[in-house]
Image (cartoon, rainbow, N blue to C red):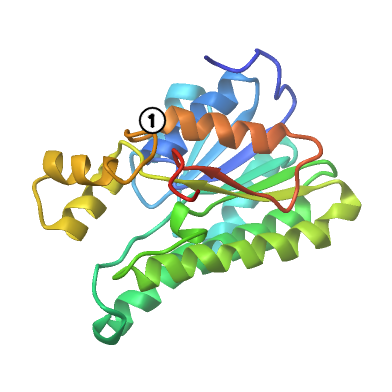
Amino acid sequence: MLPAVGELDGKVALITGGAGSIGAATARRFAAAGAQVVIADLDERVHDVASEIGGVGVVADVADSDAVRGAVATAVERFGGLDIAFANAGAFGVVAPLTEYPEDVFDHVMRVNVRGPFLLAKYALAVMRDGGAIVINSSVVGLTSDPGVVAYATSKHAVVGLMRTAAKEAAPRGIRVNTIHPGPVDNAFQHSIEVTATGKPEAEAARIFESTIPLRRHATPEEIARAVLFLATGGFVTGATLAVDGGMSI
């Protein structure tokens, strides 16, 4: 079910990781609700998603200060302001014991998953209109963890601290900041994680993961996008960690 037409009329949103399934689904949902949307991603396909919804696509490295500042400036220059920022770009790393985890991979994951949201929050808050919203995409392992995923879990816990700090700093302006914590989603990013984690073919790996989910299935990207829309419009929700994980964090 799409949001009511006009729910985001007059709003301007910026989404990082917009070429991926969750980012694209969220961009479509925001646009359907009336928002003007700027989508940033390293993947050139970001332009296809932007064209589909009548938005603006920007090829940008979310961990590069100038690139993020430029994406924020694009939103303000093209549409007159900024009301919503969704920090969605992410990297997983590898599966390995902590004592054997490659330091360069750890640094890369932290660069994308922590520095990226930090830069988006830093530059978005500087120009965001009062009453706006920031949503940071964490993970179920930002509430829990598992062996072998030290970089990913550490980064996804770290953005909760970022969110809580930003929520307190932005509250006097009526700006709300929250994290969303998806469980396994039916997309290429998640299936790659599952194959890496289990060493099994994709279909078998998916079944193994689904056996750990109380609802016994993967989420759709659209279900995550619906939750992001709620956090972008939920007027009295700030500083929250919203689990959309089929019960995995119970």
Residue drawn at point x = 66 percent, y = 58 percent: 121
Instruction: Please give left or right for residue 238 compared with residue 28 in the image.
Output: right
2 and 146: which is toward the camera? 146
Residue furthest right in the image: 172
Mark 1 sits on what residue?
220
The image shows residue 241 at horizontal and vertical percentages of: 62, 51
The image shows residue 200 at horizontal and vertical percentages of: 10, 51
Residue 4 placement: quadrant: top right
7 and 54: which is toward the camera? 7
Residue drawn at point x = 51 percent, y = 54 percent: 138
Residue furthest bottom in the image: 99
139 and 30: which is toward the camera? 139
The image shows residue 119 at horizontal and vertical percentages of: 60, 64
Q: Is residue 35 above or below residue 146?
A: above
Residue 64, can we see it?
no
Residue furthest left in the image: 201
Residue drawn at point x = 63 percent, y = 46 percent: 85
Q: Is residue 241 above or below residue 105?
A: above
Residue 105, can we see it?
yes
The image shows residue 109 at horizontal and vertical percentages of: 39, 69
Residue 110 placement: quadrant: bottom left
Instruction: Please give left or right for residue 97 compared with residue 142 in the image.
Output: left
Q: Is residue 211 above or below residue 170?
A: above
Three-letter amino acid code at the position of disc 1: Thr
Instruction: Please give left or right for residue 245 compared with residue 5 in the image.
Output: left
Residue drawn at point x = 25 percent, y = 54 percent: 193
Q: Give the SS element for disc 1.
A: loop
Q: Residues within 10 Å of mark 1 (few under 14, many from 20)?
A: some
